[in-house]
Image (tube, helix red, strand yellow):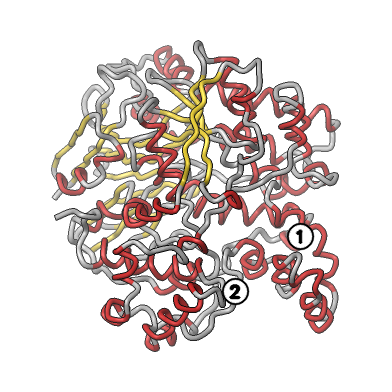
Amino acid sequence: MLGRMTRIVHHRGPDSQGFHLAPGIGLGVQRLAINDLETGDQPISNADETVTVVCNGEIYNFVELRRELVAAGHRFRTGSDVEVIVHLYEDRGADCVDRLRGMFAFALWDAPRRRLMLARDRLGIKPLHYAITRDGCYFGSESKSILIADRIDRQIDVRALRELFTLGFALAPKTFFTEIQRLQPGHYLLYRDGRASLHRYWELDPAQTEAGDGSRSPEGWAEALLEKLEESVRLHLRGDVPVGAWLSAGIDSSGVTALMSRFAPSPVRTFSLAFEDPDHDEIRDRRTLADFPGYPLSGRRVVCRTADFALFPEAIWHSEDPSLTGHEIPMMLLARAAADHVKVVLTGEGSDELFGGYAWFRADRLLRPLARLPLSLRRMAAAAPLFSRRWPGASRILLAPSRMNLTRYQHMIAPLQSDLPGRLFSPDLEQMLTRDGLDEPTRPAAFETWHPFTQLQHYEMNVRLPDWIVRQLDRSSMAYSLEARVPFLDHELVELCARIPARLKARGPRDKPVLRRALASVLPPEIVRRRKRGMTVPVEQWFRSPLPDFATELLARDSLADKGYFSPGGVVRMLEEHRAGRGEYGHYLLGVLGVQLWDEHFVRGCRPPGGA
């Protein structure tokens, strides 16, 4: 069983496989070798083998921690970053996580206490799933490891399905299976004698986040930010393998790449994404940093074409949760291209959440004052041509609740923009889905008194970032055994940004003014001044083009009726109207197709596309 659980995530670590078997415990690991290629295989134990760990991810401050631990008398047997976890645990127990600076998900077995510890990094960059059953605790980086153990019922969580078609993703700790949960960011779990307890070890201080630190000028904050970002990038370059960068035309990845070029001993390999469809091509008329003189880069461009929709079954196999956006496909293309040349890439993810880079931050700032108007007046404004035709996203926000909550947030970020032409779900499922609303995450007591920017950022950092952004980044990159690192999500950098007053982050006509000021000395002025143009995927066009065979089969009436999640007539009508140009239902159809594939991959077996 342990062999099956481990082999099924071979893609996450093809360099070596390791096991630890002892009474009451079985640990398995597929290693992606980044540090200490010769002696760093896992599991790793202490000298008397009473503490054993397996870990996915990187401990970026392991050099400094190792120096401290050696001075305190600890003896190391490897040069691996993971070994510091074992020795920190010997000294500090479960509090060892407080000293770790990195992205990680680890399982640690304490033999004398007969206690299992599962821990996840502060920002949720690395995934960790678990299921508590009558006979034990089963866990893995991906749900498929738990599924193939054959110890749980494979029943869909209808709450996760509802969230998919409202928010666009399922909220943690839920997965699409009722019996599998995700360990939350900044948490660890202790399991002993059949009982589990959850513990939170890190969160941003809400009072500090709201109050900010007014002792510095905007220039002072920019200097401090640049200094900390330089430190983070330098730490994220640690490793014994080639490191590259994912490079868009925006300021975030450009800033990371420019700093990499200062520290790297040779030209940085960069990988940029373009689209065959010019309406979705972020770099169609923009130069990337690789096109400017003075930056030692070696650039490659990857093109996402309509034919690449054929990758969707593979995308669902790796992401495990269905999708409404299709972002996984271009990201997997980018990862596949990068994996041919490097083993690690640095990316710009996390910056938009820290500095308010998404369009809905500006929309909320402009429209929040109108939220005080009576609903009748807001409906009139939403129907006016200014909003309904030229700015349809504003119409959704105007009709949202006036106070910031999950429903208002959903109106801002959800990719669904068209009303359905008929029923989507099957009658039985429809009845289950209408029982409850969205599950509002826990909010600090003083939330209602916060600056609007801080309120919105709270949802970004605690909902969309861990449950969608870094999750799809991890799954898309690890599908090709590529480690994606995110310097903007170094927790010390995040804590620094939390102290920057909200009025400075929301200041001026452009997004991310503090970051733009910080990177003015690092990047060409053209990139510093450039407005954000986020990645969008031509989902609508995909469903108007000739469909791959898998899509035709799974969207047919018989298949829809057989799986039982959706109304066959409703889905077929929606597809016909979309293909005829009488509606824009591509994102709905992608969600339906994703759930159909999810059922095929995980409910009726546990095998990759084309697998036996």
Say which element carries label 1.
Answer: helix
The answer to whether residue 242 is left or right of residue 154 is right
Q: Residues within 10 Å of mark 2 (few under 14, many from 20)?
A: few
Whole-percent x, y for residue 152 in the image = 23, 64
Q: Quadrant of the C terminus?
A: bottom left
**Quarter of the image where one finds residue 399:** bottom right
The answer to whether residue 257 is left or right of residue 542 is right
Residue found 16% across the figure and 48% down from its top: 4
Q: Which mark is residue 364?
A: 1
Nearer-the-camera pick, 99 or 611: 611
Whole-percent x, y for residue 382 in the image = 77, 75
Residue found 42% across the figure and 18% down from its top: 66
Frontmost of labels 2 and 1 is: 2
Q: Which residue is mark 2?
A: 418
Nearer-the-camera pick, 384 or 583: 583
Q: Inspect the image, locate mark 2, and give the three-letter code of the amino acid beneath it.
A: Ser
Mark 2 and mark 1 lie on one chain; the one further toward the N terminus is 1
Q: CA distance from mark 2 to mark 1?
A: 21 Å
The answer to whether residue 109 is left or right of residue 95 is left
